[in-house]
Image: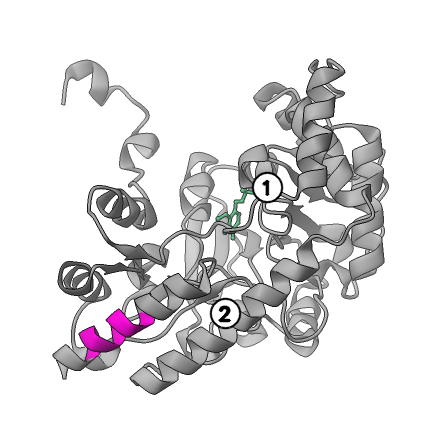
């Protein structure tokens, strides 16, 4: 490393490339691989949303919007959340339109963290959080949720809280496990936190992809709205990953500070994407529903096939991931994944990409066509038989 390179911020130097990207880069360099690695909808963005984006371009709606985003879009986001999750947010003071849930997370963490603050997260966990916590000076504290069905329980949380705990990051429906915390489980966590000065960042990007029962947000439980930042977006629900539209919903006393970070970090989300997002939320078409039905069918299929293959796992209630244990084969999740890729040309993500608590598992994304899923599971079955 050159002297100049050694001067690069140490926290940035220490960030590792995500395990998911490592595998997908390898897959891109191989041929005939069936890949179940990417967490991205395989549906096109609905046509009426594309049209709204094109119209915005033709009408020259290509200049900055106000920093927190078009007020019409913030109103639509407020109505969406209110209608679905019984959560009421003031579009003027409590909502920011962001460049995806990713930037929403970043501005939230930058707003609330100070050096040395601990951030509790249930592991295995989406790999996007830990680097952002570190870049904000925070200290990630992972809690092992393997024995509680990958759910954060009040008991686990209580043990992890210290005087340095500033915030908890939750992600349900979960990437990578697909598990969802039910109302009683959320309520128990809410009860524990009600009187504590600890924030909760609730990443609800998969809230539209829940197969059994309605989505509940931790923010809707008693005493929680005031300390919770809800993050959502249109990437998954409306197949709009490349448009980069997300939202933060947070009490006014927090949003007024978050919007300053947002202003200097981004100015505003893409104006064109904001008009497309407005159509997504107000166009009168329920785009998420048919996609959800397709994912449900795939979930049922993948879960059943995994059971037949001998990879028994709880049926995930949401998102488009399933996270079976491969511990019985005595291989690390990386060795299992690499061997399967070499032998059968089927790619999954090793569980340790989602923190050390994901070791012994693999993540399968079922945001792929039924044909790909069928082929991939046949290959996986052959591979598993070869290990016995
Ligand atoms: N949170 C989770 C849990 C995710 O899985 C993803 C995308 N993979 C994101 C946030 C980022 O989403 P966005 O495209 O809205 O930035």
In the image, what residue occupies the spot 57% across and 73% down?
A: 317
Looking at the rendered structure, the secondary structure element under dot 2 is helix
Q: Quadrant of the N terminus?
A: top left
Residue 365 image offset from top left, x and y in percent: 42, 61
In the image, what residue occupies the spot 28% across and 37% down?
A: 14
Q: Quadrant of the C terminus?
A: bottom left
Residue 330 counted in the magenta span: no
Q: Which of the pair 18/116 is nearer the observer?
A: 18
Residue 381 counted in the magenta span: yes
Residue range (magenta) = 377-384
Is 370 situated above or below 60? Answer: below
Name the quadrant containing residue 296: bottom right
C-alpha gap between disc 2 and disc 1? 20 Å
Asked if disc 2 and disc 1 are in contact, CB closer than 8 Å, the reply is: no
In the image, what residue occupies the spot 73% across and 58% down?
A: 219
Give the left or right position of residue 26, taking residue 283 as reference. Answer: left
């Amino acid at each position: 490393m050159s002297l100049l390179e050694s001067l690069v911020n140490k926290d940035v130097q220490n960030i590792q490339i995500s395990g998911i990207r490592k595998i997908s880069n390898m897959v891109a360099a191989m041929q005939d691989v069936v890949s179940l690695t990417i967490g991205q909808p395989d549906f096109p963005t609905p046509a009426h949303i594309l049209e709204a984006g094109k119209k915005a371009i033709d009408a020259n709606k290509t200049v900055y919007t106000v920093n927190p985003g078009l007020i019409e879009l913030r109103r639509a986001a407020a109505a969406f959340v209110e209608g679905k999750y019984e959560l009421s947010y003031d579009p003027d003071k409590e909502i920011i339109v962001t460049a995806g849930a990713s930037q929403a997370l970043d501005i939230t963490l930058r707003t609330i963290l100070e050096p040395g603050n601990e951030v509790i997260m249930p592991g295995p966990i989406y790999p996007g959080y830990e680097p952002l916590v570190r870049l904000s000076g925070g200290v990630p504290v992972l809690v092992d949720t393997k024995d509680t069905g990958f759910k954060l329980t009040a008991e686990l949380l209580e043990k992890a809280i210290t005087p340095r705990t500033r915030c908890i990051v939750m992600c349900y429906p979960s990437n990578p496990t697909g598990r969802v915390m039910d109302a009683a489980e959320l309520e128990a966590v809410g009860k524990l936190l009600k009187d504590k000065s600890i924030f909760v960042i609730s990443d609800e990007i998969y809230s539209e992809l829940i197969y059994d029962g309605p989505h509940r947000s931790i923010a809707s439980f008693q005493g929680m709205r005031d300390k919770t930042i809800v993050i959502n977006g249109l990437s998954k629900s409306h197949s709009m990953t490349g448009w980069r539209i997300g939202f933060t919903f947070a009490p006014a006393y927090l949003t007024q500070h978050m919007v300053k970070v947002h202003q200097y970090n981004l100015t505003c989300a893409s104006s064109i994407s904001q008009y497309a997002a407005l159509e997504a939320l107000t166009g009168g078409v329920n785009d998420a529903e048919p996609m959800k039905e397709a994912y449900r069918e795939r979930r049922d299929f993948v879960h059943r096939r995994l059971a037949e293959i001998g990879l028994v796992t709880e049926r995930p209630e949401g998102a488009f991931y399933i996270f079976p244990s491969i511990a019985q084969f005595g291989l690390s999740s990386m060795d299992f994944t690499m061997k399967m890729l070499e032998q059968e040309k089927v790619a999954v993500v090793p569980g340790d990409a989602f923190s050390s608590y994901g070791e012994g598992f693999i993540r399968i994304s079922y945001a792929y066509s039924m044909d790909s899923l069928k082929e991939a599971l046949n290959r996986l079955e052959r591979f598993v038989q070869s290990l016995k």
